[in-house]
Image (cartoon, rainbow, N blue to C red):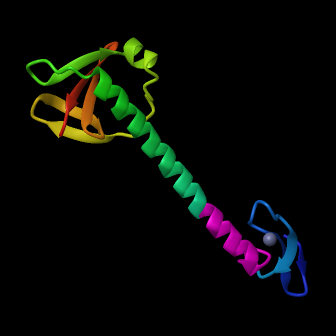
Amino acid sequence: MKYKNGQYLLVCGFELCRVEFYGPANKVYCSPECKKRKNSRKTTRVKELTQGVDTKIRVAVRILMNLFKPDEEGKMAISMVELACNAFPFDLPTTPYKDDRFRGVLHSFGAFCFYRKGEDFVFYKTK
Ligand SMILES: [Zn+2]
């Protein structure tokens, strides 16, 4: 780090600024404006990410609503191919789910949960 008159040569931490400035070693941004702009971008990013997540769950639930016809045990096996044909978002976020109907951990999203069985996914309704 370059050092001059008790201050270090730093680069602003806001990626759209990146201006070089002299300041104490622990200073991250060249100005309070950059700090503010950086923080507001962070909030936007989080919003964008979580909205994307919600979209995938919504898409998955909509697909399942169309396909799901439960047997007498309340489950339905759907092949990976059929899900893919319906543009099922396989990378959707799920939470682990325990159910008496299945020994093991299911993955849940929206009102459904599932586990993988070979080339099939077996779905249950949770609500
Ligand atoms: Zn800056």
Residue positioned most to the front: 66
Asked if one can make out residue 28 in the rendered structure from this viewpoint, the answer is no
Quadrant (top left, top right, bottom left, bottom right) of the C terminus: top left
Residue at image position (90%, 87%) is 5
Furthest residue in direction bottom, as rendered: 5
The magenta region covers 25-42
Q: Quadrant of residue 96?
A: top left
Q: Position of residue 22 (x, y in %)?
A: 86, 79
Instruction: Locate residue 60, reporting x and y percent.
Output: 38, 32
User: Could you say where residue 16 lies in the image, as x and y percent from the top left?
Assistant: 79, 61
**Compared with residue 66, is residue 6 higher up or lower down, i.e. above or below?**
below
| Horizontal side, residue 9 vs residue 98: left or right | right
Q: Residue furthest right?
A: 4
Looking at the rendered image, the quarter that the N terminus falls into is bottom right
How many numbered circles does the render carry? 0
Residue at the (19%, 37%) spot, across then down: 126
Quadrant observed for ligand 1 in the rendered image = bottom right
Residue at horizontal 36 percent and vertical 31 percent from the top: 62
Report the predominant secondary structure element of the magenta stretch. helix
